[in-house]
Image (cartoon, rainbow, N blue to C red):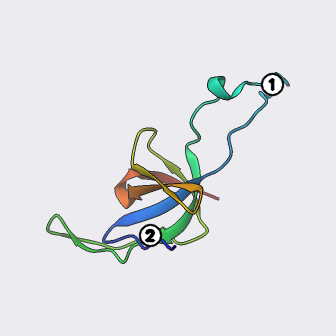
């Protein structure tokens, strides 16, 4: 099954959270923060959203930082994805 986002929506897959701190302490699963860095898997076509023209500036393969509690989480073929609006993407990681 494939996810094809509509309008200004973007499908992202979270990058795995760090299991160790910089000082070498191993974190249990419950102590790890929800990752904010994600990889773009699919991009909608843009168009007119809320009366304004939206051009998509992200592309498949970009690593991005999203708002912490944004988007809708979905599971497809056993893999977890989030569908967010392009406006919920804060930055592209280069």
Q: For mark 1, does the 10 Å Cα neighbourhood hold few (<14), some (14 to 19), or many (20 or more) residues?
A: few
User: What secondary structure is marked by label 1?
Assistant: loop
Mark 1–mark 2 contact, CB under 8 Å? no
Residue drawn at x 43%, y 64% is: 10
Location of residue 56 by image quarter: bottom left
* First along the sequence among labels 1 and 2: 1
Q: Out of 83 and 51, give the one closest to the viewer.
A: 83
In front: label 1 or label 2: 1
Percent x, y of residue 28: 72, 24
Residue carrying label 1: 26
- Locate residue 13 relative to residue 67 in the image: left or right: right
* Residue found at x 33% / y 71%: 6
Residue to which mark 2 is pinned: 57
- Label placed on residue 84: none
Question: Would you place residue 82 above or below residue 11 in this image?
Answer: above
For the point 55% across and 43% down, which residue is it? 36
Q: CA distance from mark 1 to mark 2?
A: 37 Å
Relative to 93, 72 lies left or right: left
Question: Please, which residue is most extreme toward the left here?
Answer: 51
Secondary-structure class at tag 2: loop
| Image location (x, y in percent) of residue 12 | 52, 59
């Amino acid at each position: 099954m494939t996810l094809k986002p509509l309008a200004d929506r973007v499908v992202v897959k979270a990058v795995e959270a760090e299991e160790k701190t910089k000082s070498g302490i191993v974190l249990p699963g419950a102590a790890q923060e929800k990752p904010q860095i994600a990889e773009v898997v699919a991009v909608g076509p843009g168009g007119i959203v809320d009366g304004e023209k939206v051009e998509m500036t992200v592309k498949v393969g970009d690593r991005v930082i999203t708002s912490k509690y944004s988007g809708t989480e979905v599971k497809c073929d056993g893999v977890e994805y989030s569908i967010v609006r392009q406006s919920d993407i804060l930055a592209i990681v280069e």
